Amino acid sequence: MKTGTGNLILGGLLVLLGILFLLNSLGVTSFDFGDFISILWPIILIIIGVRVLRGSGFCRGELPVGVTPKKQNKFMGEMTFNASGTEIDGWSGDLFIGEAKIDLTGAKLHPGENVMSAETFIGSLTVKVPREIKCKVIASATAGELRVIDKKADGISLRLEHEDEGYSEAEEKIKIFARAFVGEVKVLAVRG
């Protein structure tokens, strides 16, 4: 399922759920939320389990042929990745709940496009990109706030894209996929 379609379906489900809560609060319906929650939790766990088994790579299909993904996963807490001296092409990080901090200062880039992804289910994700590295960013959040270089958005079903001037012609460049289900995504240009 494409990200846009998934966001549309999830957004529709959240609106429907909100309407049901509102109608129940107003006494228009007698919806039993206890039964609903007892059904919802197993479905959520199944979805999470399937994503874990599939590898949950946000940029699935985007990695160049022959690149072995490097993964960093954490369930809860703070996840940090300092890329200094590290080859980042194919790197991905997944955090379920918490704060993820990724610093690409000093990262090793191979010639051509280097691709990486970072994702959090609930929490915040910050990626620092040195200004001298040409980058293309695709950031999304189902609900929350996005800040990508010089663009900002907040609300539901968000997507921001940024491409540095001269990205296509750059000898070394990085394509970043950054996503939060609920939370904040920041991709910041910093001095290297």
Image (spheres, rainbow, N blue to C red):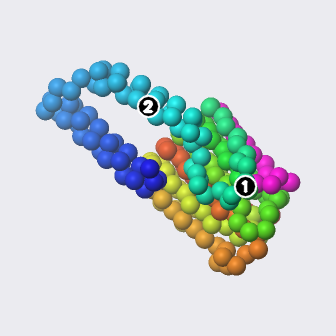
The residue identified by callout 1 is: 66
- Count residues near mark 1 (Cα–Cα under 10 Å), then give few for <14, some for 14-19, many for 20+: few
Eyeballing the image, is 56 above or below 158? Answer: above
Residue 84, magenta (yes or no): yes
Which region of the structure is painted magenta? 77-88
The residue identified by callout 2 is: 44
Q: Is residue 32 visible?
A: yes
| Residue 77 coordinates in the image, percent (x, y) | 65, 33
Q: Secondary structure at mark 1?
A: loop
- Residue at 51% x, 34% y: name it: 50
Q: Is residue 22 left or right of residue 147?
A: left
Q: Observer-nearest residue: 57 or 146? A: 57
- Residue at 67% x, 74% y: name it: 167
Mark 1: amino acid: Gly
Q: Is residue 187 visible?
A: no
| Residue 58 coordinates in the image, percent (x, y) | 57, 49
